[in-house]
């Protein structure tokens, strides 16, 4: 089956890069399932990626991330852009699949062949993203998406991982969700490139925007650094969404002009390579039944070995296993 699948990979990639939704769906499924074909898929996608602008959308639960994403997609389509959306949902503890299903919440785009929406389960991975998100972004990039929107789970203070995943990070807040001090404590003042105070038709929106601007103004930023704008929106009606998209595009232009885009993407690739390498080591230890790790852990617990020396032994054993 694997050999037949391997022969099918070039055709699958070719169809996906032509924008075939079924082929894109199949490739992302291979990514989520960590298929043995994944290495060949990523090799086949090489040279076809790097064109899409990746926009991360994050914020606390209840700020309107899905509604804002839906409105952003509509604005992007009016501009003639092909859009991919990866909506990372909390996972079912039984199936591991996405629990909420954004293809239902973004139903108005369901029949648009220039929009691809995929719900992905976080599967217990912290940071608001799925472990397979980087590879799924690559698939959508290769499929010709001009913009890939990654919407995070919405789990509060652990969501900052999206900043390392995206070219532009859009942080959403809403009136009544906490003051500027709470925003600082949550770490969102460090990760955002563009901020939106959504539900701006509610009482307190102006104050929330003012507090956020004040907090951002005192942040330590080097000369020539990007100054994050704060936009007010009402995503349910589309108010302010075009202005928000204009700021996202302005940030994209700034990234290109300053060389920051290349720096961010290099850091992203570094993290991806590191994660794959660590995952490979864990697989080797699992195939060995974890016996080496258990024995070394027992020696550390007994005081016979320090943890650094134990780690060196474990890595050395992994290298021997790999070469053999």
Image: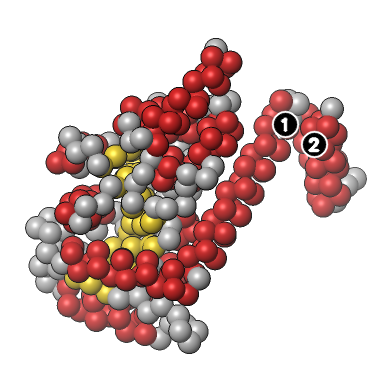
**What number is the disc on residue 284?**
1
Question: Going by the picture, which residue comes out furthest to the right?
Answer: 304
**What number is the disc on residue 15?**
none
- Label 1: how many residues lie within 10 Å, few (<14), some (14-19) or many (20+)? some
Q: Is residue 285 left or right of residue 320?
A: left
Q: Residue at x 39, y 29 (%)?
A: 15
Q: Is residue 189 visible?
A: no
Q: Residue at x 16, y 54 (%)?
A: 78
Q: Is residue 250 visible?
A: yes
> In the figure, 223 relative to 5: above or below?
below
Instruction: Classify mark 1: helix, strand or loop.
Output: helix
Q: Position of residue 35 (x, y in %)?
A: 54, 27
Q: Which quadrant, please, contains the C terminus?
A: top right
Instruction: Classify mark 2: helix, strand or loop.
Output: helix
Q: Residue at x 86, y 49 (%)?
A: 309
Q: Which quadrant, please, contains the N terminus?
A: top right
């Amino acid at each position: 089956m694997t050999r037949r699948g391997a022969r099918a990979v070039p055709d699958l990639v070719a169809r996906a890069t032509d924008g075939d939704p079924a082929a894109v769906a199949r490739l992302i499924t291979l990514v989520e399932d960590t298929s043995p074909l994944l290495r060949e898929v990523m090799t086949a996608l090489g040279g076809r990626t790097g064109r899409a602008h990746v926009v991360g959308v994050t914020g606390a639960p209840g700020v309107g991330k899905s509604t804002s994403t839906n409105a952003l997609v509509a604005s992007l389509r009016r501009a003639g852009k092909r859009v991919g959306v990866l909506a990372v949902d909390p996972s079912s503890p039984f199936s591991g699949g996405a629990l909420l299903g954004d293809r239902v919440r973004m139903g108005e785009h369901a029949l648009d062949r220039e929009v691809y929406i995929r719900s992905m389960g976080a599967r217990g991975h912290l940071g608001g993203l799925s472990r397979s998100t980087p590879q799924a972004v690559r698939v959508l990039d290769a499929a010709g998406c001009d913009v890939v929107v990654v919407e995070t789970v919405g789990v509060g203070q652990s969501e900052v991982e999206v900043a390392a995943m995206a070219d532009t990070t859009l942080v959403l807040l809403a009136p009544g969700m906490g003051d500027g001090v709470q925003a600082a404590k949550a770490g969102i003042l460090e990760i955002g490139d563009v901020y939106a105070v959504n539900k701006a038709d509610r009482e307190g929106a102006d104050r929330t925007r003012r507090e956020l601007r004040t907090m951002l103004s005192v942040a330590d930023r080097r000369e020539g650094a990007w100054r994050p704008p704060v936009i007010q929106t009402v995503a349910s009606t589309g108010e302010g969404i075009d202005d928000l998209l204009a700021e996202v595009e302005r940030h994209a232009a700034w990234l290109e002009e300053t060389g920051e885009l290349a720096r961010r993407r290099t850091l992203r690739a570094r993290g991806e390579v590191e994660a794959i390498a660590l995952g490979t080591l864990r697989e080797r230890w699992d195939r060995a039944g974890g016996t080496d790790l258990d024995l070394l852990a027992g020696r550390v617990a007994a005081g016979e070995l320090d943890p650094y020396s134990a780690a060196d032994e474990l890595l050395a054993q992994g290298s021997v296993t790999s070469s053999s």
